[in-house]
Amino acid sequence: MIHVQDLVKTFGEVKAVDHISFDVAEGEIFAFLGPNGAGKTTTIQMLTTLVTPTSGTIALDGIDPRQHPHDVRRRFGIVFQDPSLDGELTAYENLELHGVLYHVPRRTRTERIERLLKLFELWERRDAVVKTFSGGMKRRLEIARGFLHTPKILFLDEPTLGLDPQSRNQLWTHVKHLNESERVTVFLTTHYMDEADRVASRIAIIDHGRIVAQGSSQELKAQTKTESLEAAFLALTGSTIRDERADAADQMRQVARMWRR
Amino acid sequence: MSAIYILWLREVKRYSRSRAQVIASLGQPLLYLLALGFGLGPVFEKAGQGSYLQFVAPGVIGMSVLFSSIFSGIGLLWDRQFGFLKETLVAPVPRLYIMIGRTFGGATVSMIQGTMVIVICLIAGFRPHHLSSLPMAVLFMALIAIVFAALGTTIGSRLQNMQGFQLIMNFLVMPIYFLSGALYPLNNLPVGLRIATRIDPLTYGIDGLRGAFIGTSHFSTGTNVGIMSAVAVIFLTMGARSFARIQV
């Protein structure tokens, strides 16, 4: 369902993604694990037509996002890592807008919006503008929105960041359900090893833009001779703490990027 | 079509909810109208040109439409900052529709803004020569709104962050306004200014507004409509192309 080969993305001289290759089969739940700044989000951005790769091949359901971005966009749904709601609109209006953009028929739309808002306990606040919401509520709304339509491929970029255990549980139950009943292929990134262990059928570990290992949770543990996925992860990526790049050179780059081309 | 509509509606809703912004954006035209209209009035009259308030009011109306339409387009930068832009960029809707919904939403909002300035002008003592010319005035407001909302979208698509905003303000928006003949008559200008005013698309929009409101214009209505429509098509095409190329 997702085929990636020798994918590269460079920003200036920084290689954010460095020759990665992997395949995700239809109906699979695939987890991308990696420290901060490892290239997880950049990979998702390339898969979802938001960023053009420097080189390499991508095919989603057999289609190249560079050649046919519109056809690719019809096949996936995404929950972004960082906020993407309109703060001036109400919770309901945000979902309504999403439903219209994703061609969900009116009746289904109304039903699903109500069900999802209730599921994520936002129904009482549906007519409040989103900028008055707490961080956790906004996050729940983003996730509810991601489930409004049923795509072939669902991208979840660190979906549980800032979620309480209850919502986290709701989220994974829902993902599992979609995966089993609708055969939705799921591509997720997370920092929480227990989550990846629990839901993902296959895991790739990415570090410094390269995939350092991939396989099932068992295979990764066996490969590193460790007891838990967390220990396997640390064995593969080392235990130094990573900072997201934001040095002087990076700031210069941002200024230069202000005027693209 | 429903995608265009919902994005148009979003712009209108956002506008109607930001009362503080609505009032703030009426301040500047009011200042121009009162300070210039009454301040330069006596000189203008001595020069034998009639009432300056009558002359400048269409210019001030055009100004408010210009400012709010161009800023609605640049509002794209806020959506980029707050992340909402991504949500529309990955949606299975042609980017052209998204751009059109946004741009026409912005244009609608600036026409509402322009209408409020018309009311203020009327209160200040501005008298249009004939009510039958009102549809023509609305047409010119719409043309100004679309031209500059599309220009704003083009700029907003190419800028990465707010740092460039001041640059755009000082080197694009203000010159467009001051070189448009909004504040002075277009005849007997020095060569340099004469050329600049002819290049500035807002010139034809304001001249058209003036023709509709007070019955005197420098160019013919046909010329004004023709040039503004052509520029609208060019800017919309530019906006659509830039918007289609956005990367996050």
Image (tube, coloured by chain):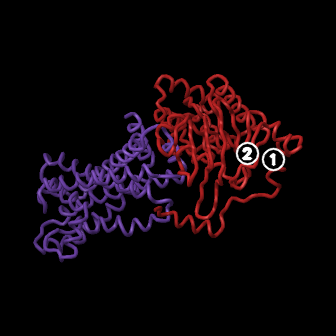
Decide which of tag 1 and tag 2 comes sooner along the chain: 2
**Quarter where residue A241 is shown:** bottom right
Identity, as a three-letter code, of the amino acid under mark 2: Leu
Residue A8, position in %: x, y?
A: 61, 53
Q: CA distance from mark 1 to mark 2?
A: 8 Å
Q: Which chain is red?
A: A
| SS for dot 2 | strand
Residue at position x 52%, y 67% in the image: A256
Give how far across and how far down residue B99 sits, in percent: 39, 46
Q: Residue at x 69, y 33 (%)?
A: A29
Q: List the residue tagged with mark 2.
A: A33
Label 1, residues with CA under 10 Å away: few <14, some 14-19, many ≥20: many
Which quadrant of the structure image shows residue A125? Answer: top right
Determine whether the residue tagged by mark 1 lies in a helix, strand or loop: helix
Considering depth in this image, is B52 or B242 the residue closer to the camera?
Answer: B242
List x then y, in percent, for residue B192: 22, 76
Q: Which mark is residue A167?
A: none
Return the residue nearer the eye: B230 or B110.
B230
Relative depth, front residue between B143 and A186 = A186
Q: Which residue corresponds to the image point at 22% horizontal and 51% vertical from the top-left? A: B229
Q: Is residue A204 left or right of residue B241?
A: right
Q: Pointer 1: what residue? A: A233
Q: Say which colour chain B has.
A: purple
Amino acid type of the residue that numbered disc 1 sits on in the rendered structure: Phe
Q: Which x, y percent locates residue A172?
A: 70, 32
